[in-house]
Amino acid sequence: MRKEMTTSSIFLLLLCATTSLATCCSCFRIELNHVDSKANLTAAEHFRRAGSRAQLRLESLVVTAPLTLGDGDYIAQFTIGSLKVHAMVDTMTNLVWTQCKTCRPHCFQQELDFYDLSMSTTGEAVYCNDSLCAAGYETQPCTGHHGRAGACAVRTTSDFAVDIAGVLLTEEFTFGSTEAKIAFGCITETNNVMGLHLHGASGVLGLGKGALSLVSQVGGNRFSYCLTRDHVQSSSLFVGPSAGLHGDAPFESAPLSLNPPINEPFHSYYLPLATVTVGEPDLDDIPFEALNLQGGLIIDISYPFMLLVDVAYQEVRQVMSRKLGSSLVPSPVDWLELCVAHSDVRRLVPPLELHFGDGTRGGHWTIPPENYWTPVDISTSCMVVLNSALMASPLNKTSIIGNYMQQDMHILYDLDNQEVSFQPADCSSI
């Protein structure tokens, strides 16, 4: 039996998506980038060039992990050494990390055991003089009396804008029947003074563009996922040669932006959004420059809903208001402007069309009403396309397509061809 998201959980997500404070939400994750002269090499290339004793497997690996829907996040299951791990999947960050047993003083609450290097026969520390310590923006310069012989430190910012720090280790990861030596952050320090948790997860599985992300480390330059609406049945994440679309259902592809923002706060995947239409194509006067603030539209698995920069949001709101007319009802919450009765969503709300293009390639993504309108009380559904202007910097100038819009779509990232493909699917069956 399907178990849909409850009204209370959706209400919490809506609150999280609109607050500008780091209070209770998983919506603000901004990495503290260490910008220096590090070469743009993958972790595997660093291992190959330096002959590190902690060798990664350099061939492309077939990685598959089950994904389950949490409270607005998708959780992957795998093992680190012999430890079972639940990690939030995130395409806006690079680092793969989990909390370690020595984590102090205000670490995230988690349901599973903490990783303990002293109990592992396969885990190894990465030192400052190892080339892997220069592979990612999350690694920190080595200072103090240990110099280049000390442990390689990592620092970033997690969910809830909580600073986290630790050391870089390598360990045997197991994804189903696949084993791989992966570099990951062993988190030993946070400033989580509010005692927040990662919805029961014990860390984050970073799928961003950086050298320390899972995608870069296992090779293959492609990954895919299918996000179920179901809280009971799982769907799947595929990384490497196994990633691909399935069946004969039609699909669309859009180019990845080759010119992301300078000093971007994320290591994200940007799609060059050209226009947006609501139903019939009468919404075509959004300035190109406005739609491409911060490099275009970020496609993200961890943010729940859709953000549009103010000028684009105002156009969508006005056209939608005109189309729905007298069917609109008062909003039960202050930050959602457009609402209708539950029964009117499928009957009256038009699809939202996102049109992508970089001058040479294009593509479009049709988002059905049930993927951008959601119940907020027992009788009312509201549009969960949100105005970026309500967000804290830098999200206030950023457009994002979140995981709610991606449910029951098989999404393929082909990094060799620099494109993302979208295929309608029943994700509970993939």
Image (spheres, rainbow, N blue to C red):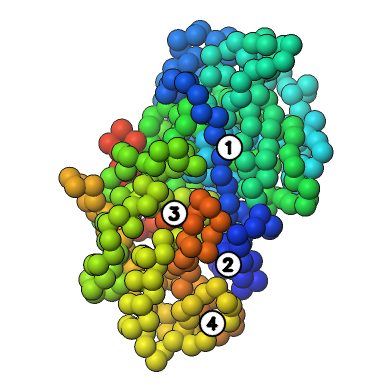
Residue 68 appears in the picture as rendered: no
Q: Name the residue carrying label 3.
A: 398
Residue 366, percent from left and from top: 31, 63
Q: CA distance from mark 4 to mark 1?
A: 37 Å
Which of marks 3 and 1 precedes in the sequence? 1
Q: CA distance from mark 3 to mark 4?
A: 25 Å
Quadrant of the rendered structure where residue 249 is?
A: bottom left
Residue type beneath disc 2 = Leu
Residue 228, percent from left and from top: 49, 58
Q: Which mark, residue 32?
A: 1
Q: Name the residue carrying label 2.
A: 14
Q: Please state which of the two labelled residues, at mark 2 or mark 1, is closer to the viewer.
A: 1
Q: Is residue 195 left or right of residue 334?
A: right
Q: Name the residue carrying label 4.
A: 331
Which of marks 2 and 4 precedes in the sequence? 2
Residue lying furthest left: 360
Residue at the image position 61 percent from the left and 62 percent from the top: 19
Q: Is residue 418 above or below residue 40?
A: below
Q: Nearer the viewer, residue 370 or 232?
A: 370
Q: Is residue 405 above or below residue 33?
A: below
